[in-house]
């Protein structure tokens, strides 16, 4: 009964080869987030969608892009992964319009070789 | 701008001892404060939020607006409490104030 599902759980990609991570939700939440979490560090917000409105963090590299074709799905595209992009990528959802929590997926562990 | 500060990166206590994980925040409006927990190899999950005023797994946290703090407390720590704890904030209002911002986290180790 997982509510935020990330695929794949583990992704290995080559240096410079584009990669896409996916996230789906069954909660019908209007906000979807992508966080990057490196070892022993806090989740770092990359960007988020409020419905179709895309909100990029100021320090998110241009190498990272996102798509949200509909309410349920959100994708993280890394155009040219570098070794420094190896991390856990977390997707989360929340509902704006009331006090609520964020629900997280299990994450995708990205390895760049 | 939203900011969450967790001054302790690591905290180690013995089983049965009281534990307090500190969190301070900076936000100009009315914030909602959360504590999230990440157990080893598990997803990040909500532990508690200030608006609920509830106690989860023996943990409580009180929002102190005067001191802009939201410290997490438990009177008697258990070994299963060992985890990474993140304080987080979201706000109301226009712009992107609703987005969830995390502190750097505190790794709690409860020793037998």
Image: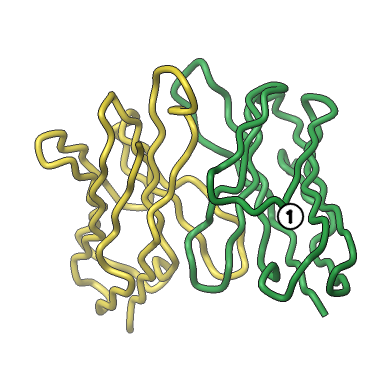
Chain colours: A green, B yellow
Residue at image location 77% in from the left, 48% down from the top: A76
Q: Residue furthest front?
A: A62
B21 to B66, vertically: above or below: below
State the image coordinates of residue B71 (x, y, percent, origin top left): 22, 50
B22, A18: nearer the viewer: A18
Residue position for label 1: A63
**Figure check: A29 above or below A77:** above
From what the image shows, is residue B65 above or below residue A29? Answer: below
- Would residue B38 be found to the left or right of residue B65 on screen? right
Q: Quadrant of residue B75?
A: bottom left
Mark 1 neighbour class, 10 Å CA radius: few under 14, some 14 to 19, many 20 or more: few
Which one is nearer the viewer's eye here, A52 or B55? A52
Which residue sits furthest bottom? B112
Q: Secondary structure at mark 1?
A: loop
Which of the pair B54/A15 is nearer the observer? A15
User: Image point 43% across, 28% down: which residue?
Assistant: B97
| Residue A89 found in image quarter | bottom right
The residue depicted at 74 percent of the width and 60 percent of the height is A108
Write down the quadrant of residue A80 in the picture: bottom right
Total labels: the figure holds 1
Is B6 situated left or right of A112 in this image?
Answer: left
The x, y position of residue B31, in whole percent, is 32, 30
Residue A27 vertical position relative to residue B26 in the rendered view, above or below: above
**Residue A94 located left or right of residue B86:** right
Q: Position of residue A40 (x, y in %)?
A: 50, 72
Quadrant where the image shows the C terminus of chain B: bottom left
- Front position in the image: A29 or A34: A34
The N terminus of chain B, quarter of image:
top left
Q: Residue at x 61, y 33 (%)?
A: A55
* Drawn side of residue B108 relative to residue A35, left or right: left
Q: Chain of mark 1?
A: A
């Amino acid at each position: 009964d997982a509510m935020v599902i990330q695929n794949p759980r583990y992704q290995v990609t080559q240096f410079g080869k584009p990669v896409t991570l996916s996230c789906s939700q069954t909660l019908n939440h209007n906000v979807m987030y992508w966080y990057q979490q490196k070892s022993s560090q806090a989740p770092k917000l990359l960007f988020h969608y409020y419905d179709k409105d895309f909100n990029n963090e100021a320090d998110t590299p241009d190498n990272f892009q996102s798509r949200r074709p509909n309410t349920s799905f959100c994708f993280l595209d890394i155009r040219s992964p570098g070794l420094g992009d190896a991390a856990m990528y977390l997707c989360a959802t929340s509902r704006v319009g009331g006090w609520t929590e964020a629900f997280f997926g299990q994450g995708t562990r990205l390895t760049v070789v | 701008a939203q900011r969450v500060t967790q001054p302790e990166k690591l905290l180690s206590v013995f089983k049965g001892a009281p534990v307090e994980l500190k969190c301070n925040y900076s936000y100009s409006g009315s914030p909602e404060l959360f504590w999230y927990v990440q157990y080893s190899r598990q997803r990040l999950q909500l532990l508690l939020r200030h608006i609920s005023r509830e106690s989860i797994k023996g943990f409580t946290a009180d929002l102190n607006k005067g001191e802009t703090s939201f410290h997490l407390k438990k009177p008697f720590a258990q070994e299963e409490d060992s985890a990474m704890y993140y304080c987080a904030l979201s706000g109301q209002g226009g712009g992107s104030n609703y987005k969830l911002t995390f502190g750097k986290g505190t790794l709690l180790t409860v020793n037998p």
